Image: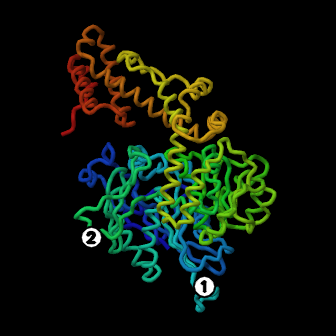
Amino acid sequence: MALQGPEEVGEQVEEPEDLDDQDASSISPAEEITLPPGAGGDEESEEAFLLPWDRFSSWLHCICVVGFDLELGQAVEVRQRSPRVKTSICYLSFPDSNSGCLGDTQFCFRFRQGSNRKSSLGCFLETTDRDAPPCLKVGHYYGYVYFRQVRDKSLKRGYFQKSLVLISKLPYVTFFHSVLKILAPEYFEKQEPCLEAACNDIDRWPTPHPGRILTLPLMGVVIKVRIPTCYDKPGTSQLVQSAQSDSLVSIVLPTIHEVDLFRCFHPVYFHIQMLWELVLLGEALVVMAPSPAESSDTVLALVSCISPLRYCSDFRPYFTIHDSEFKEYTTRTQAPPSVILGVTNPFFAKTLQHWPHIIRIGDMKQAGETAKQMKVKKLKNLKTLDSKPGVYTAYKPYLNKDEEIIKQLQKGIQQKRPSAAQNAIIRRYFLELTQSFIIPLERYVASLMPLQKSISPWKSPPQLRPFNQLDFMKTLEKTGPQLTSRLKGDWIGLYRHFLKSPNFDGWFRSRRREMTQKLDALHLEALCEEDLQQRIQKHTEVEAVDLVLKLKDKMTQAEREQLPVRPGTLSKLRAHIEAVILALPEDLQGILHTPSTP
């Protein structure tokens, strides 16, 4: 079942080829959203650009309801136009039969976008991506699930089984799980009218631009959140400060995306440092858990443990044998890909037996018992999904084990320290470890930037010097991680391995793009400081026209890429272009001069 937007809107929609399945519970986004440039733009001017359901589409792709049909199995109770993705959503929205999840269960899954998709919210997503922290960059689709299974003798199967699923491109895990806690119980009681009301509420929400503090009404409840930005200091609390106007706020979310690391890693916390290395290096990892909730939370915890570094490989919080990438990820004809999978089906204990690193998570409610699993286990001992909890791998960490963090967490368990405090300890530990590792790389890459005095307005911007692994390794002797970390071990070996990983490739591409844009911005600022009118007096009309065209290209690039130029630079450049055009003969002015719109 899906909720469709107004017919006149729905008919105009062209959805991505692999996710154009809208059901009676899903709202179709409008064709395109246009927002003013800048981080978030001005909210009032934004209103003029938004079409019906644009606000909804900036938060959610659609809402699905998945039920269980005795003849068909899992089925989306809606009209859909893409059978392949419809099937994927169906199977990913239900726990495997062996999970035995009675009552209400929440988890999430993640799947790829189509390569030939049309972005219905291109401009908005570009702005969001530019200002979002690395871990919140938009890429895949996420499915946030609220599954209910209760006994019902009136049904042939003896159980009521249904999932309410939110599909979104936004990786706001904590936020959407909170939304489902409000929406799902209401839906299971009141059915479709409740979803229609919720969709109308969501379509009145402001768009989720990074840096904004938002109050979001939903079903009579008001949620207050802050959307993080890439400019936030890592490790600082995102807690929204209460104000006098908050009297109507029902829920204040201190984070929209972070999971409880201590709860997720509790069964294997003796190995958190080794797990950090495996994630950092982009190693193939599989998490075997008793339920989708524990599987998805643990995968998300692993991905976030190297923050603020972005995990650049694929990860699937909940993966099933029906997934379209099943054959690709389970083949034995080649080495396992750089991916983290979360699974619950016992079949995977055999299918993924050749994978190099397997984390077996027990029931988190009994984490106190499983925490005694201290030794790393041999892979040959993992025969079924019922094997004892622990980490099964032959991997030997590069760094010496940090006994201090283990003792600190053990002491917290013995003294029954609150989970929030334990979570803060682990999160700070991972942050300091990642920063100690990445600072030498940041320092070296910054040295590849040409000196500002080498930038000439009349020459192309200088190029970044190439990354040289040997030169970088030489810098570690004096300015390596030993300056900020107490850990000893083979840091050189860890860096050498990291430089071959997808995480380094993604990080360096991002840094190179930022630095190249900075060089372009400095070049543009240098151009604006020149007396262009005096210069064209010494040149022919053809050269003057060529200059105007190049300046216009520079202007277009600066606006398209949102180059980090000083305030007023683009206005000054426009004035220069106008002045040069006016100095030319009238016939050329008519060709080059673009009159300003009233």
Q: Residues within 10 Å of mark 1 (few under 14, many from 20)?
A: some
105 with respect to 288 (left or right): left
Quarter of the image for residue 282 reads: top right
Where residue 159 is drawn, which disc sits there?
1
Where residue 497 is drawn, which disc sits there?
none
Q: Residue 549: percent from the left, percent from the top? A: 34, 23
Residue depicted at 53% across the width and 77% down the height: 104
Q: Quadrant of the C terminus?
A: top left
Label tally:
2
Q: Give the spatial CA distance, label 2 vs label 1.
A: 39 Å
Q: Residue 291: percent from the left, percent from the top? A: 62, 69
Q: Residues within 10 Å of mark 2 (few under 14, many from 20)?
A: few
Front in this rendered view, residue 17 or 370: 370
Q: Quick one: label 2 or label 1, which is nearer the N terminus?
A: 1
Label 2: element kind:
helix
Front in this rendered view, residue 128 or 405: 405
Q: Residue 545: percent from the left, percent from the top? A: 31, 18
Q: Is residue 247 visible?
A: yes
Q: Is residue 562 above or below residue 55?
A: above
Q: Is residue 133 above or below residue 528?
A: below
Nearer the observer, disc 2 or disc 1? 2
Furthest-top residue in this view:
538
Q: Residue 71: percent from the left, percent from the top? A: 66, 79
